[in-house]
Amino acid sequence: MSALLQASGLWKSFGDREVLRGVSLDLAAHEVVALIGASGSGKSTLLRCLNLLEPIDDGQILLGGDDISDPRVKVDAVRARFGVVFQHYNLFPHLSVLDNVTLAARRVHRVPRAAAEERGMHLLERIGLADKAADHPDRLSGGQQQRAAIVRAIATEPEVLLLDEITSALDPELVGEVLDLVRELATDGQAILMATHEMAFARDVADRVLFLDGGVVIEEGPAAEVFGSPREARTREFLSRMSGG
């Protein structure tokens, strides 16, 4: 498969601390790739660099063949091609759920309000939140807020969906409903790059897995292989620790 998103030799430091050290990856259209690794391994920084929320120190990022790491690139235009969901929902508290979902479509992509709201309501109906469309985020549970944040990210039909530990701030009983939505998006063919601590979910949903440690990709391969018979000792140690031994 040809790569929709391709990163080559990414380096990123914060002061004297090297967070990414020559990371390379690729993501094909309709593919799901999971980033796994301990906290501080560089997963979130990698996602932020890919979306140009953080500048890279070295390397190259291609999106649909376009060099989006070129300093002359129009950053806002690049970010509009991604959908991003973070650990914390980041919904605007003063806006209704429907206004949150349609804001980017209306303001960034210039979709007429009626068309944006029609698509927004269709998506909210699909995830069982149509009856919450007029509510403000503080009236929703954490799981509902995160599902609304995912719908907001896909409402603009992004080329790539970046998910950054989207279940880590949720109570355990709410995790399943969020992961079910991601599983559905993957089945629909959305290209997804996700950083996650949910090992069973990554094993079941991801096409490929990258294990990061200390800002370096230690191992990558098909999910079944990485989880079933990891080649590297550090991968085995991490997975054993995550599974409780």
Image: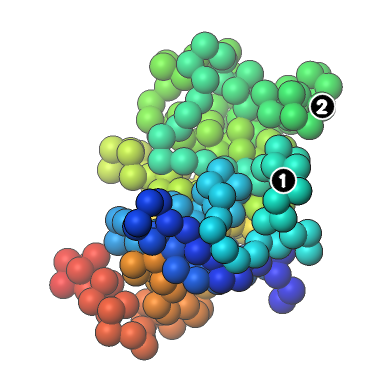
Q: Is residue 120 visible?
A: no
Q: Is residue 239 left or right of residue 108?
A: left
Element class at badge 1: helix
Q: Image quarter for residue 96?
A: top right
Residue 162 shows which numbered tag? none
In the displayed structure, would residue 102 be above or below residue 233? above
Residue 78 shows which numbered tag? 1
> Which quarter of the image is occupied by the C terminus?
bottom left
Of the two numbered discs 2 and 1 in the rendering, the one whose residue sits closer to the viewer: 1
Amino acid type shown at disc 2: Arg
Amino acid type shown at disc 1: Val
Q: Position of residue 47 (x, y in %)?
A: 52, 53
Q: Position of residue 43 (x, y in %)?
A: 42, 58
Q: Image quarter for residue 67?
A: bottom right
In the displayed structure, would residue 80 be above or below residue 124? below
- For image coordinates 44% across by 68% down, the residue present is 21
- For image coordinates 41% across by 41% down, the residue present is 87
Depth check: give the residue in front, 8 or 26: 8
